[in-house]
Image (spheres, rainbow, N blue to C red):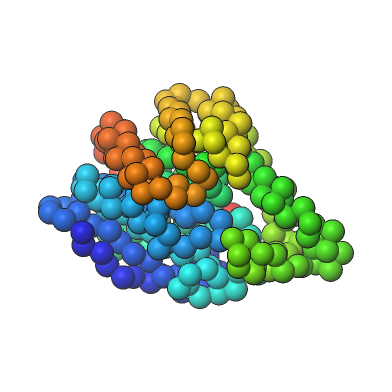
């Protein structure tokens, strides 16, 4: 693999750390943008495995750390779901300036919900793949139950997520509740591939079913039987990457009908 270390400015002006995975041979036939799961990083094993499977299929992949996470600048406490979408749009603008706007968006967990939103700002994007995504971003509140009262009363609380402390603010929760996910999914206008495991104990499989039922064609659903929410087993993430690569090529030709100069629009 050819992996380039990069940085670019995110939605809030913080410098975000990124990696660009390029094919081992030849030029990319297209570019993809990857959104990692909530409080994860671009270096999470599943993110790397999926990105490299795509690059083997000659699809360049930009993966990055959202503001306040991993090697990126900024404070996590100052971010919201909307700012994550803004970071994705900024990443797409960066790709467009330096290489080519992404024709494929891939998102894991909350990152899956974020790419569904971001696609509306990226005209060249023709294919969106979600992995274990919630049907509504506010699903995250179910995992913050013990801290919700403190967040509402004091405006913020420190919460342990995957064994690490994160500050969750009332603004973060309010922003989650403000999202109209059904409208976003219905108006997607791109090919959609949904991965979800019936064994997912963090974001239940009913979420994947709801996204599928709400979306318009073309849409596909793949059940990841035996996989956990984070795709902890290497074979699961490698399988997901291989399937996305094979599926997306069917829709890449459609991106040729969109002028390359069509600009990525700012997230509101």
Q: Residue at x 68, y 68 (%)?
A: 167
Pinpoint residue 56: horizontal percent, then vertical percent: 21, 48
Residue 267 position in % (x across, y down) = 54, 54
Q: Quadrant of residue 243?
A: top left
Q: Tell me: 39 left or right of 246.
A: right
- Does residue 157 show up? yes
Along the viewing direction, whichever of 63 and 261 lies nearer the viewer? 63
Q: Residue at the location (61% across, 37% down)?
A: 204
> What is the quadrant of the N terminus in the image?
bottom left
| Most foreground residue, 204 or 217 | 204
Total marks drawn?
A: 0
Residue 246 coordinates in the image, percent (x, y): 27, 35
Residue 7, position in %: x, y?
Answer: 38, 71
Q: Nearer the viewer, residue 94 or 113?
A: 113
| Residue occupying the far left of the picture | 25
Residue pictured at 40% horizontal, 48% vertical: 233
Which residue is pictured at 79% across the width and 57% down the height? 146
**Looking at the rendering, in which quadrant would you find the C terminus?**
bottom right
Q: In the picture shown, does residue 249 fall above or below 229?
A: above
Q: Along the horizontal axis of the image, is 6 left or right of 138?
A: left
Q: Is residue 148 left or right of residue 197?
A: right
| Residue 83 shows in the view | no
């Amino acid at each position: 693999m050819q992996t380039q270390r990069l940085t670019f400015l995110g939605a809030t002006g913080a410098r975000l750390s990124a990696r660009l995975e390029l094919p081992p041979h030849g030029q990319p036939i297209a570019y993809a943008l990857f959104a990692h799961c909530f409080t994860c990083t671009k270096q999470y094993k599943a993110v790397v495995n999926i990105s490299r499977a795509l690059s083997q299929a000659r699809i360049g992949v930009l993966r990055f750390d959202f503001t306040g996470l991993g090697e990126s600048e900024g404070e996590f406490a100052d971010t919201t779901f909307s700012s994550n979408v803004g970071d994705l749009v900024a990443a797409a603008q960066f790709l467009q300036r330096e290489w080519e706007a992404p024709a494929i968006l891939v998102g894991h967990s909350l990152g899956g919900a974020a790419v569904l939103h971001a696609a509306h700002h990226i005209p060249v994007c023709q294919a969106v793949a979600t992995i274990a995504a919630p049907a509504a971003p506010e699903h995250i509140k179910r995992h913050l139950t013990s801290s919700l009262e403190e967040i509402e009363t004091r405006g913020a609380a420190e919460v342990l997520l995957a064994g690490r402390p994160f500050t969750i603010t009332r603004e973060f929760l309010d922003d989650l509740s403000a999202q109209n996910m059904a409208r976003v999914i219905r108006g997607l206008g791109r090919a959609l591939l949904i991965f979800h495991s019936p064994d997912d104990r963090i974001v239940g499989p009913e979420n994947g079913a709801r996204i599928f039922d709400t979306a318009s064609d073309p849409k596909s659903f793949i059940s990841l039987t035996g996989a956990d929410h984070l795709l902890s087993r290497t074979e699961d993430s490698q399988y997901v990457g291989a399937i996305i690569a094979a599926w997306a090529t069917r829709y890449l030709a459609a991106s040729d009908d969109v002028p390359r100069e069509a600009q990525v629009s700012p997230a509101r």
